[in-house]
Amino acid sequence: MTAHYAQENICNLLPKLEKPVRPLRNISAARQPVKHDTEKNKAQWKTMGPAKVAVPSQKNFLKKHSKEPKLPERKKEQDSKKLPALSVPQRTYHPVTEIQNRKNFINANVVAAVTALPKKPQPIYVDRRQGDKYLLETSGLVPKYIKKKDYGVTPKYVTQRNEEKKRAQKEYEASILEHLQKVAMKQLSDEERTSLLQGLKKNWEELYREFQCLPVEIDTILKRLYKEKLESQMRQLEHDIEVIEKHKVIYIANDCSNRQNQNMSSYFFP
């Protein structure tokens, strides 16, 4: 029964597909040698240096002062010249007592301690009743600058600067005095005053004579300008004569005494 059912299975009714058989490809005879060479030289550029390097030992690390220069070793001849080592003294050895120092250090220390001056306490200050202690010297409360030898003494650069100022002031005063002597005022005497007054009046008379000689009718520009010039000169001379007659004391500068045709602006009337 079982064989009968197996022959009549529905799966057997379907046609079976057969796979097409491919023909064999051409395989090169040098395939295996080429494969072996590629595996041998594969990725050599991925390492720095050879692929297999000996691992360094842990004992060959860089030690301290290993790169510093070292002195050359001594020769045997130098070692032989060393002094022989001193032997240890025996128990029965006693030093010579006569050469020992007879100073009594105990008594000397007692005397030095008794006669020594007591140590002064270090000055301190406290900011509050239950505060901490601070040194008084570094606090700025001690007037230690007053106790200096050069306290209150004028520095050298200040004295030098003051001397230079005084020298410059003296030179300036001397130049001023020299200038004043050059332009000093000189008082005119009575004779010079009278002669000056007479000269001004004489000039006024000459100008007045020229003014009287002018024509009655002034019809040109030159005549009009000449008339105005004479009038201004006469007016100035009248003013100068009035001032000199009004002031009896007149001062004149020394540099103006040698000038000719002096102007009244060179004079000083107190």
Image (cartoon, grey):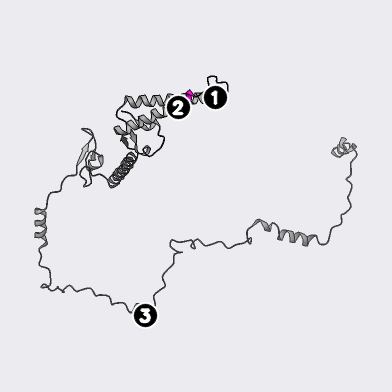
Label tally: 3
Which image quadrant is residue 132 in? top left
Marks 3/2 in contact by CB < 8 Å: the verdict is no
In the image, 13 versus 56, the foreground residue is 56
Task: Tell me which label, 3 or 2, sits earlier in the chain.
Answer: 3
The secondary structure type at the circle numbered 3 is helix
Q: Is residue 198 above or below residue 82?
A: above
Q: Along the horizontal axis of the image, is 104 left or right of 74?
A: left
The circle drawn on residue 207 is 2
User: Marks 1 and 3, Cα distance to the nearest angstrom?
Assistant: 136 Å
In the image, 160 versus 12, the foreground residue is 160
In the image, 55 versus 209, the foreground residue is 209
The secondary structure type at the circle numbered 1 is helix
Near mark 2 (Cα within 10 A), the count class, few <14, some 14-19 or many ≥20, is some
Residue 1 screen position, x and y as percent: 86, 37
Q: Along the horizontal axis of the image, is 111 left or right of 197?
A: left
The circle drawn on residue 223 is 1
Q: Nearer the viewer, mark 3 or mark 2?
A: 2
Q: Along the horizontal axis of the image, is 219 left or right of 44?
A: left
User: Marks 1 and 2, Cα distance to the nearest angstrom?
Assistant: 15 Å
Q: Amino acid at mark 1?
A: Lys
Residue 97 screen position, x and y as percent: 11, 72
Q: Which residue is mark 3?
A: 77
Residue range (magenta): 206-218
Residue 193 counted in the magenta span = no
